Amino acid sequence: QVQLVESGGGLVQPGGSLRLSCAASGSIFSIRQMGWYRRGPGKERELVATIINDGSTNYADSVKGRFTISRDNAKNTMYLQLNSVKPEDMAVYYCWVTTSPLGNYGNYWGQGTRVTVSS
């Protein structure tokens, strides 16, 4: 079992920045991949970014060049740096980890943290 707790959401102006955090606990050694999903108002859930154990990252086209995913293994924490935020980035952001190679089992989710984009 892995427990995930997000923090860092809030109100940000268009063009602004925000950093989301996801603290993991439990069977951390079993994590194969970590990432962030989001669900905007009236939208389906979208994969935002992922990071695997070797540090390789992947991003949705909609956030490439603006968002950065990272992890601090010493703190068992993953981050998502949001820069140049756009109105369409407004969503509830969910931390996700998987303990399986393909993500078809052993998936865990945080409770979500809301990002509101408004001037």
Image (tube, rainbow, N blue to C red):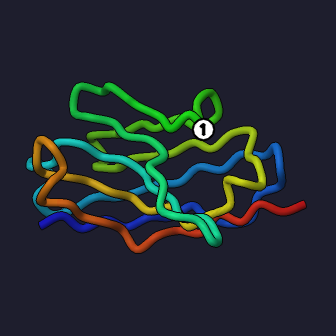
Viewer-closest of 26 and 43: 43
Instruction: From the image, tell me which residue sits under label 1.
Output: 63
Viewer-side residue, 40 vs 5: 40
Identify the residue shown where x is 61% and y is 65%.
40
User: Residue 71 vs residue 86: left or right?
Assistant: left
Tell me what residue is drawn at x 39 percent, y 58 percent: 95
Q: Is residue 14 left or right of residue 38?
A: right
Q: Is residue 10 left or right of residue 105?
A: right
Q: Position of residue 16 (x, y in %)?
A: 78, 46
Q: Quadrant of the N terminus?
A: bottom left
Does residue 20 lie above or below 80 as drawn?
below
**Which structural element holds mark 1?**
loop
Q: Amino acid at mark 1?
A: Val
- Where is the C terminus found, in terms of image quarters? bottom right
The x and y percentages for residue 111 are 40, 74
Q: Residues within 10 Å of mark 1 (few under 14, many from 20)?
A: some
Residue shown at 28% from the left, 58% from the top: 24
